[in-house]
Amino acid sequence: MTFEFTLCILSLFFFAGIGVPVAYAIMIAAAIYLSTAGLSVGVAGKTLMDGLYSSFILLAVPLFIVAANIMNAGTISDRLLRFCIGLVGRFKGGMGHVNIVASLIFSGMSGSAVADAAGIGKIIIEMMTKSGHFTRGYAAAITAASATIGPIIPPSIPMVLYALVSNTSIGALFLGGIVPGLFMGIVLMGMNWFISHRRDFGTEEAVPLVELPALTFRAFPALLMPAILLYGIYGGVTTPTEAAAVAAFYALILAAAFYRALTFRGIYQILVDSARSSAAVGIVIGGALILNFIVASENIPGRMANALVDLDIHPLVFLLGVNLLILLLGCVLDATTIILVIIPLFLPTCRELGIDLVHFGVVSVVNCMIGLITPPYGILLFVINAVTKIPLVEIIREVIPFLVVLILALLTLILFPGITLFLPRLMGYPG
């Protein structure tokens, strides 16, 4: 490791540590490396532009953000919630189950954990606390935990970013996330059932079964989005980027024409918010592209791969070690930074050890999502605190049991790759 690269890494951690946004910290560290190494700043500009212009897949990110914001607007969330209440609200801990099932359904439309928590999550927290059957800390904690499923079930913005750095099939990644996402939902519902019985949480008034068909009919058009998305990609009708455009257009038609839930002012605000969110992600991507160029120039991935292969390390031991590192980094770094900056360092070793990159990608994204609720940095904890004003101490205390079962679910996914690869293989993926 050269002096210039060491200085770059130290600068990165220093500026991030004093509170500089990660994207800017990366760019400052990259500028320090280029100046000390005697390279022109133009190298960074060329690397950035080449990376952006050669990666058409990045267009999917703002399109999925637009689709998520549209689905958050109007009456779509309300219709989905009423459907979930009719489906699982009758069981012990009913509104907790509704919270998780709503996240499972909404994850097929947003691809973003933050969009899930800030949108439909806020509504469910109000419903859970208003009934008086749940404490506000528990309602906030289960909302944060269930929101982690959002980027696992397709569409998924983090998986699009992973596909960018690993050159892996987005379709295979999307399919690979379905079973793990459902598995996460099941373990969260199991924990909610256990806690509800232990604390004797009240049960909601059951919605008559005769009303369920009508509730399903009203929610059905929104429930179709994931099916349309996957059929477009795997039916050969659209590329992943075109599928993202179809998803955004379908969400717009659904909200504006079918449900009549959007005005021109509302559409304008959605586009403005989406542009801001896309710009925030874009800045991190730009910084990561420059930093990845520096890492490649130093041949860090190659050195790591050679060192680990020479140690004759078992693939499972490597997977466990990398995931432990990602879990620890998730306490202090956001998921986008980990996926774009940290994970690419391990991809050459995965190839050398014969680890399937779809399995590695899905497991890594699940791990990054768990980091969103891991103290002290867990961004979902701060998002829910900001939109509900529930104290962080209450949320953190109640989120621990859900954090534990999600880590156990992650370990299961690592030990049994078939859970992740079942659907991709069923659809012809060679892994």
Image (cartoon, rainbow, N blue to C red):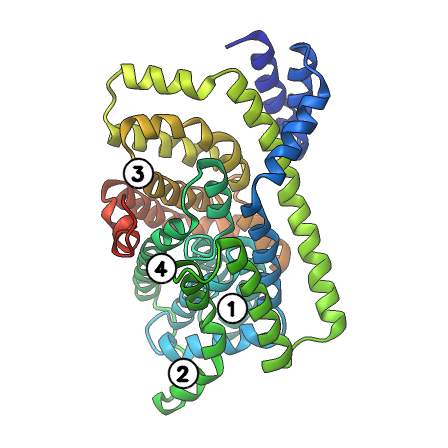
**At label 2, which amino acid type do we have?**
Glu
**Picture disc at residue 40:** none
Q: Which residue is mark 3?
A: 356
Q: Is residue 395 above or below residue 109?
A: above
**At label 4, which amino acid type do we have?**
Gly
Q: Which residue is mark 2?
A: 205
**At label 3, which amino acid type do we have?**
Asp
Q: How many marks?
A: 4
At mark 1, the secondary structure is helix
Label 1 crowd (10 A; few <14 / some 14-19 / many >=20): many
**Picture disc at residue 124:** 1
Work out whether residue 313 or residue 99 is closer to the camera in this orientation and state it: 313
Query: Residue at image x 44%, y 71%?
Result: 133
* Residue at mark 4 to residue at mark 3: CA–CA distance: 24 Å
- Do the residues under discs 4 and 3 have CB atoms within 8 angstroms? no
At mark 2, the secondary structure is loop
Q: Which residue is mark 4?
A: 185
> From the viewer's perspective, is the residue at label 2 or at label 1 nearer?
1
Looking at marks 3 and 2 on the same chain, the residue that comes earlier in the sequence is marked by: 2
* Residue at mark 2 to residue at mark 4: CA–CA distance: 23 Å
* Residue at mark 3 to residue at mark 1: CA–CA distance: 38 Å
